[in-house]
Image (cartoon, helix red, strand yellow):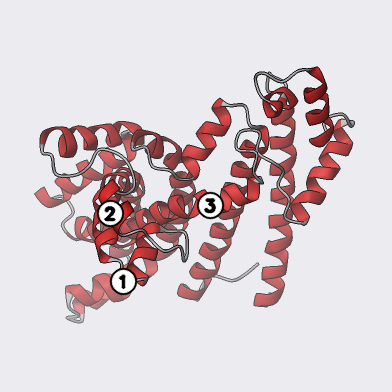
Amino acid sequence: MTLRAYLLRRLAFVVFVLLGVSMITFAVARVIPGDPAALYAGPTARQPAIDAARKLLNLDRPLYEQYVSYLDGLVHGDWGTSLRTKRPVLGDVLTYAPLSLELVIAATMFAAVVGVALGVLSANKSGGGIDSVLRIFAVGGVALPAFWVALMLQVVFSRFLHLLPPAGQLGIDAMVSHPITHVTGMPLVDALVTGNFVAFFDGLRYFILPFLALAAYPTGVAMRMTRSAMLESLGQDYVRMERAMGVSNRVILYRYALKNSLAPVLTVLGLTLAYSLIGMFFIEQVFAYPGLGSYGISAILSLDYPGIMGVTLFVAVIYVLTNLAVDLAIAALDPRVTLT
């Protein structure tokens, strides 16, 4: 199958997946207890105002018409209006998402580099003391809940060592004296590309703890998967032949064994990125980080169903596109893989 045909097929699959997600979230949102019109109108609104809000939100129409109207809005970039902020949901999502994606991308890149490197080291030292220590860290990163890791990092580095701030995104002094110019919506990236190093280093202090808490799980998974795949590759006949021919251990590890082990590792990293998108809901609450996770939690607590649906749909889009990118990367790295 050609690359173009494969992409068209996968994009069609993406459309069906998102359609299914929209149906599920729409149905769930409609069974949430409470009156969305009353929430939109406000706690002191009277019945005429509530009726007007119900008409404005199309809640006076049959459910199938509401869903068709919702799909039409999605196609035209209208994801509805938040009952809590009174702003377009798509605008809210695009405002808060870059802060979360900055965390998620950094955590996934850290896992891809550090987790894979430590996995290779663990496989190379299999059965030794270094391997045992690394396996303990890997299991801990996978097994410990993200919110617990976040709380422990707060206690150790903020409460006892006083090295890093416990919560927030940027210090008040830096926020006032060196405001960040909006470019991408990612604060650290924007501060760096605009040369605002005062805000960059100040924001980095607030970034480290949520980043470490979010990176613990994907790094542990990458370490375990890399170690397992490397041990399997190192036990193959071609590796024994290379050793018999006098090829150095470094060449065997990185040129042959690691390359043949990357396919399952990349697959797992793609899945952990999706997990990180979910984990950010807890991490951002612990560290009072104003990203998409905090927005989603606020939407849930206030029964803001357009906001809930918008966050869910956005996460689904990122998830399916990440899986597509991983499949293409695996096909590019491993000539044995065919696009089907």
Q: CA distance from mark 3 to mark 2?
A: 21 Å
Disc 2 to disc 1: CB gap under 8 Å: no
Residue pointed to by mark 3: 95
Three-letter residue code for mark 1: Gly
Which residue corresponds to the image point at 32% horizontal and 74% vertical from the top-left? 256
Front residue of 323 and 192:
192
Residue 333 seen anywhere in this rendered image of the structure: yes
Q: CA distance from mark 3 to mark 1?
A: 22 Å
Residue pointed to by mark 1: 195
Q: Secondary structure at mark 2?
A: helix
Which residue corresponds to the image point at 31% horizontal and 51% vertical from the top-left? 219
N-terminal-most mark, 3 or 1:
3
Looking at the picture, does residue 238 appear above or below residue 152? below
Looking at the picture, does residue 26 appear above or below residue 90? above
Counting every numbered tag in the picture gives: 3
Q: Secondary structure at mark 3?
A: helix
Three-letter residue code for mark 2: Ala
x and y percentages locating residue 139 in the rendered image: 27, 40
